[in-house]
Image: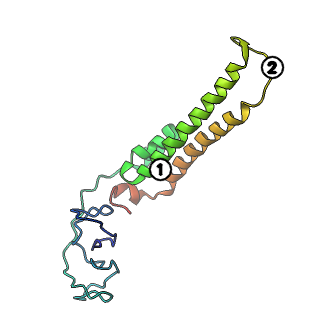
Amino acid sequence: MFCRNCGTKIVGPAEQCFLCRSEPLSGNAFCSGCGCPTPYPVKNCLKCLTPLVYVAARTSIVKPKSKTMAILLALLLGLFTWLYTYKQDARKFWLGLGLTILSLIVFLAALGFVLGDAAAPGTLTHLNANWLLPMMVSFMIVSALWIWSLLDVLRKNNDWYTQYPNFP
C-alpha cells in the first residue's frame, strides 16, 4: 500500500503516513496500489488499474521551528542542534553522538597514555609523541561533527523549518 498524498510505501496497518502524516488513503497525487503519480481526472490508476477515490488530504498539525534558533543551536551546541528537529534528524543525532563518544574514548586513552608515562605526578620521564595522533584525530572528529551540524542547518531552506515535521 502507498500513501495517496506523498507516494511513500506504507508497511503494515498505519493510521498515518510516517512521512507526510496524512491518512494513508487521503490525497489525490499517487496510486494506493502501486505508488505511481496519478493525474486528477482518472478513475483508475493508469499503471495497475486500481480504482481511485479522491479524498482531501488531512495532514497533521504543523509545529513550525525557527531557522534562526537552529543556527544558534548549531553554533553553540554542535550536534545537539539535531535534537531541535529530532523527528527528521534522529539518524544524524545518533551517528554524531556515537562518533563523539568514540572520539572521547580515544582522547581519554591518549590522555591516560601521557599521564601514565609520568614517573612522579606532573613530570614526564621521556618525551613521547605517540599520544599526539589520537588526540588530533579525536579533536578532528568533534570539529568535523560541529561543522557538519552547522552546514546541515544552513543548507535547509526556511520552508523546511516552517512546515516541520511535514517537510520531506
Residue 81 x %, y %: 45, 43
Q: Are there few (<14), some (14-19), or many (20+) residues within 10 Å of tag 2?
A: few
3D distance between C-alphas at marks 1 and 2: 42 Å
Q: Quadrant of the C terminus?
A: bottom left
Q: Secondary structure at mark 1?
A: helix
Q: Which mark is residue 79?
A: none
Residue 97 x %, y %: 49, 41
Apparent side of residue 117 relative to residue 9 in the rendered image (left or right): right
Residue 42 lies in quadrant? bottom left
Q: Residue furthest top?
A: 120
Residue 64 x %, y %: 32, 52
* 58, 142: nearer the viewer: 142
* Residue at horizontal 44 percent and vertical 46 percent from the top: 82
Residue at image mark 2: 126
Indicate which label's residue lies in the foreground, 1 or 2. 2
Apparent side of residue 124 relative to residue 36 in the rendered image (left or right): right
Q: Secondary structure at mark 2?
A: loop
* 51, 78: nearer the viewer: 51
* Residue at horizontal 80 percent and vertical 23 percent from the top: 127
Q: Residue flagged by tag 1: what amino acid is it?
A: Lys
Q: Residue flagged by tag 2: what amino acid is it?
A: His
Residue at image mark 1: 92
Residue 46 lies in quadrant? bottom left
